[in-house]
Image (cartoon, rainbow, N blue to C red):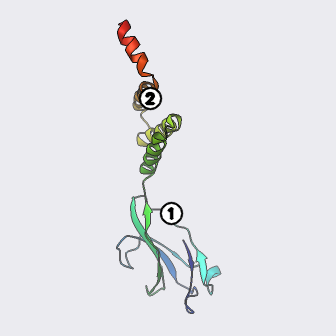
Amino acid sequence: VQWTGKEPHSVCVRRDFVALYAAGQPARKYLDYKQIDKEKEGKDSGSLEFVAPSKPGPYFVRYLRADYTELAVSSTIVVRSALSVLLEEVKSEGMQGNAETVLEMFETVMLSLKANDDTFHKQALDSWRELQDKKTRPHSDMHDSSAAA
């Protein structure tokens, strides 16, 4: 989180803090906060780092004085699950015809879904590879193999 003060009295003072909130929460219902350290006192800008919440959803941060007077509010910060990001990338790459990239991403997704079940991984990946083979196999091969049978 970065901020820059615009008002004449917006310099950082002792006990100011920046707090992280789930969307719609009042000032005293923060999830996490960071106090302004001594190095930033008297300055009109700075930055702090927060760990993203584990639950996907909308969040925001507020810059507050010690008495909870709000000096600034961020725009909405959307936290997404890693799985949803990977699946979106898989879909995007698949639509572009990048089967190899899709397979690599699919493997990553499978590993994140069920990390300790090797049999499940193997079955899922085998099924995916069969599907990819069917998609890349020319239609005439299917007619030739059925005529030979």
Against 10, residue 133 (above or below) is above
Which quarter of the picture shows residue 43?
A: bottom right
Against 13, residue 94 (above or below) is above
Which quarter of the picture shows residue 24?
A: bottom left
**Residue 29 location, x and y as percent?**
37, 75
Mark 2 residue element? helix
Identify the residue at image location x=43%, y=71%: 60
Residue holding disc 1: 51
Kindly check if marks 2 and 1 are in contact, taking CB atoms under 8 A apart as contact. no
Identify the residue at image location x=60%, y=80%: 45
**Residue 102 location, x and y as percent?**
49, 38
Q: Which amino acid lies under the numbered mark 1 shown in the image of this protein?
A: Val
Identify the residue at image location x=51%, y=79%: 17
Q: Which amino acid lies under the numbered mark 2 shown in the image of this protein?
A: Gln
Disc 2 from disc 1: Cα separation: 38 Å
**Residue 101 location, x and y as percent?**
53, 38
Left or right, residue 43 beside residue 73 = right
Q: How many marks?
A: 2
- The residue sitting at the bottom extreme is 8
Against 22, residue 85 (above or below) is above
Image quadrant for the C terminus? top left
Mark 1 residue element? loop
Q: Nearer the viewer, residue 46 or 91?
A: 91
- The residue sitting at the front extreme is 140
Residue holding disc 2: 132
- The residue sitting at the top extreme is 148
Q: Residues within 10 Å of mark 1 (few under 14, many from 20)?
A: few
**Residue 46 location, x and y as percent?**
60, 77
Image quadrant for the N terminus? bottom right
Which callout, 2 or 1, points at the residue further toward the start of the chain? 1
Against 61, residue 128 (above or below) is above
Instruction: Give the label, 2 or 1, closer to the camera.
Output: 2
